């Protein structure tokens, strides 16, 4: 049984592990196929490629925070050329959008919750290659105002209206294609801490995502039941879409276990994947 995990994050985005720490955990876990998919950055790809032993298949990837028409979504790009100039331009655009979002959230904490971040905290945020809610949540938890990141996000950040600061989904998908990659809809029924879509809600959104150019579905996911996984695989097969899977591992920033591909954390063989251009 070849074990895999195609959705991993490092501290180049909102994970807690460095690239070298993650590589050692991958080796210890005896994973055989992995993908690094940090949010809106390719900063760790080269290092991870160089650190992994030759017997582990490595897929360079990225997770783009997007809005495809009226659907907020995360789009995974697998098999990308991380040096592609079109992708670099899109990443730079994303940085500017996230800076707007970050400053809106900082002001929200100050004006609504009377939480004013210190200069050292601000410096740490602004030094990040990719800043998301989890980074701000960590500061809130460190101050003892919440038990964990999920509580901090729900209580202090989810009420903040930042407007649309996401990348255009169709542009994101086209950019992944231009970078030689395959665009996959990440956790399409809902991600960590989100209410899962009903079948009808998902099927409606799926048609929009297909129209936008999506080529695959992340069917195996750490928060999905066997029934949800079977449903997603059926939808992928019916629509000629690739099947991928990943844990959405963030190290200590989430409770997701490395290599966890379903809610029961049961092992899954890579034969269940259908992404033949890559594995």
Image: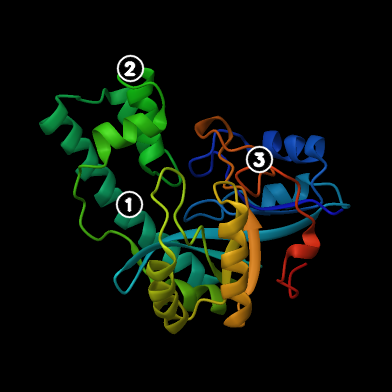
Using the image, determine if residue 272 lies above or below residue 277.
Answer: above
Residue 110 occupies quadrant: top left
The reply to whether discs 3 and 1 touch (Cβ–Cβ < 8 Å) is: no
Give whichever of discs 2 and 1 has the lower sequence position.
Answer: 1
The image position of residue 170, as x and y in percent, is 40, 77
Q: Residue 267, relative to residue 206: is it above or below?
A: above
135 up-or-down from 100: above or below: above
**Which is more N-terminal, label 3 or label 2?**
3
User: Which residue corresponds to mark 1?
Assistant: 98
Residue underneath mark 2: 143
Question: Of the residues tagged 2 and 1, which is closer to the observer?
Answer: 2
Residue 167 appears in the figure: yes
Q: Residue at x 11, y 32 (%)?
A: 111
How many other residues sit within 10 Å of disc 3, few (<14), some (14-19) or many (≥20)? many
Q: Is residue 83 visible?
A: no
Q: Is 54 left or right of 9, judged from the image as shown?
A: right
Q: Nearer the viewer, residue 143 or 120?
A: 143
Identify which residue is drawn at 76% across, 47% down.
267
Which one is in front, 161 or 269? 269
Judged from this view, the residue extending furthest toward the left is: 111
The residue labelled by disc 3 is 19
For the residues carrying marks 2 and 3, which lies nearer the camera in this image? 2
């Amino acid at each position: 049984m070849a074990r895999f995990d195609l959705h991993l994050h490092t501290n180049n985005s909102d994970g807690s592990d460095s690239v070298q720490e993650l590589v050692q955990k991958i080796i210890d876990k005896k994973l055989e196929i992995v993908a690094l998919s940090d949010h809106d950055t390719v900063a760790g790809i080269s290092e991870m490629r160089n650190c992994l032993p030759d017997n582990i298949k490595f897929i360079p990837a990225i997770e783009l925070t997007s809005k495809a028409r009226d659907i907020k979504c995360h789009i995974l790009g697998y098999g990308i050329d991380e040096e592609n100039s079109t992708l670099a331009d899109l990443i730079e655009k994303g940085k500017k959008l996230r800076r707007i979002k970050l400053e809106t959230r900082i002001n929200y904490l100050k004006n609504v919750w009377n939480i004013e971040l210190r200069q050292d905290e601000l410096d740490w945020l602004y030094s990040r290659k990719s800043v998301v809610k989890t980074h701000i949540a960590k500061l809130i938890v460190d101050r003892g105002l919440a038990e964990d990141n999920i509580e901090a996000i729900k209580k202090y950040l989810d009420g903040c209206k930042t407007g649309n600061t996401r990348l255009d989904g169709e542009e994101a998908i086209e950019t992944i294609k231009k970078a030689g990659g395959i665009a996959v809809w990440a956790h399409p029924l809902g991600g960590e801490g989100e209410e899962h879509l009903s079948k009808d809600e998902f099927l409606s959104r799926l048609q929009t995502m297909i129209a936008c150019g999506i080529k695959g579905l992340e069917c195996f996911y750490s928060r999905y039941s066997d029934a949800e996984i079977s449903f997603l695989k059926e939808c992928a097969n019916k629509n000629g879409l690739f099947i991928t899977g990943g844990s959405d591992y963030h190290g200590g920033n989430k409770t997701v276990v490395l290599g966890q591909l379903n809610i029961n954390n049961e092992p899954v063989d890579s034969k269940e994947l259908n992404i033949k251009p890559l594995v």
